[in-house]
Amino acid sequence: MLDAVVVGAGPNGLTAAVELARRGFSVALFEAKSTVGGGARTEELTLPGFRHDPCSAAHPFGVNSPAFRALPLERYGLQWLNSELPMAHPFPDGSAAVLSRSVAETAASLGPRDAGAYRRLVEPFLARWDTLLRDFMSLPLTALPRDPVTLARFGLAGLPPSTWLMRRFKDERAKALFSGLVAHVMSPLDGPATGAVGLVFALAAHARGWPVPRGGSQAISDALAAYLGDLGGAVHTDYEVKRLDELPPARAYVFDTSPTALARIAGFGDYYAHFRYGPGVFKIDYALDGPVPWTAPEARLATTVHIGASQAEIGTALRAVSRENRAPDHPFMITVQPSVVDATRAPEGKQVFWAYGHVPHGWSGDLTDALERQLERVAPGFRDRVLARATAGPAELAAHNANYVGGDIACGAASGLQLLLRPRLSMFPYHTPHPAVFICSSATPPGPGVHGMSGHNAAKAVWRRLRRT
């Protein structure tokens, strides 16, 4: 009998398997697709030689993850590449605000009226970043806070809505930049704890940047899988699990799946009936005949570029998909241009480009024209550079990764109480009705992102049970 079986080879499933194998437990991992990776894969989606990331591309939480940093992933080929600027936010007038590794450079880009306010906001937390992040990402009850005072101060600043936090800024540049950080969780700007979301993204950039892995996001998954193999863990691909009794006997079962899928496989009925899925995304992967023709020079130096003309425009787009169930006229866009630092991703002189906008859950329309009109506002002539594009709406994303229910790449709405307490209101979120069955996907704390911490935290719960029994 195995000690543990893990279902789903996304970053969290792989991390959970590695953490258990590191502690001497026998582990087998089962993945429905032909390759490991989940939301961290790399494929040729457009033309030969153009290697795209179907989901995640830039990884502020991957490079900062306490779980990943404790593993020898560089030994297995993972190499983080940072651009000169982690993120740029260009505006239609040709200027840009930036998120730089330097707090001073970031503050200066926001203008003289907001530079001091930004520095006062982030500098106290940056000095204690590694401890703060570990405390923030290890809760609830997987570890006692190492710095409860700083964590409490962070809570006071971040738990209110981001619209409250942004009152300290006077000009549009700072408000738009911070709104774009919050928009990564696809939650309205006035939602609770959204201030913390923006703060964490900013601090991550100042600490270690928003890098891309050399060769694509698949490098993260491949490094985890290779390390697991060296630890004696077995990986089985092309193995779709529909019932619990299709798995080999084990003392514990760990699921890197959506709560809906887990309930269906394990026969939990309506145990997760109140779990909410959030808005979806409409994603386009481009093969380009050269760099994006950004008007703002700062955008040419950044791997990640946010597109939204103002706080009001970004807020309107988020409300449209979250509360009005419609696609926005001017969608907020998150784009990544890996070729700025990684020439291996496209043929010489060409580039890959990654972009998405938010849409309602399960939306079935085509957002291509709206997204490209947004791009043309800050990069006129963009369409002339397009050699090929691969589009994916909610249905295609869900077909590619079963955890993206309705196109929700966060595996559950990251809004309201569910931003912090997921997948149920429980102090033991990785446990399920069955004492030997656990969940470790992004539906559990600390939530979405390629960081492995949900798998790391769930593995703690598993090995405590295994040692007791």
Image (tube, rainbow, N blue to C red):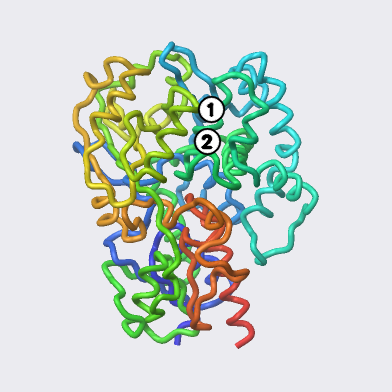
Q: Position of residue 299 (x, y in %)?
A: 44, 21
Instruction: Tell me the residue at 39%/70% (across/down).
Output: 7
Picture residue at 35% right of the left edge, 37% below the top: 357
Task: Check the image and report above or below for 103 versus 196.
Answer: above
10 Å crowding of disc 1: few (<14), some (14-19), many (20+): many
**Image quadrant in which the C terminus is located:** bottom right
Residue designated by label 2 = 181
- Residue 71 visible in the shown view: no
- Which label number is shown at residue 297? none
Circle 1/circle 2 CB separation < 8 Å: yes
The residue that disc 1 covers is: 177
Instruction: Give me the C-alpha separation between circle 1 and circle 2.
Output: 7 Å
Q: Nearer the viewer, residue 300 or 274?
A: 274
Compare residues 415 and 47 and report the one nearer the observer. Answer: 415
Q: Amino acid at mark 2?
A: Leu
Q: Residues within 10 Å of mark 2 (few under 14, many from 20)?
A: many
Q: Position of residue 459 (x, y in %)?
A: 56, 69
Considering the numbered disc 1 on the image, is that residue within a helix, a strand or a loop?
Answer: helix
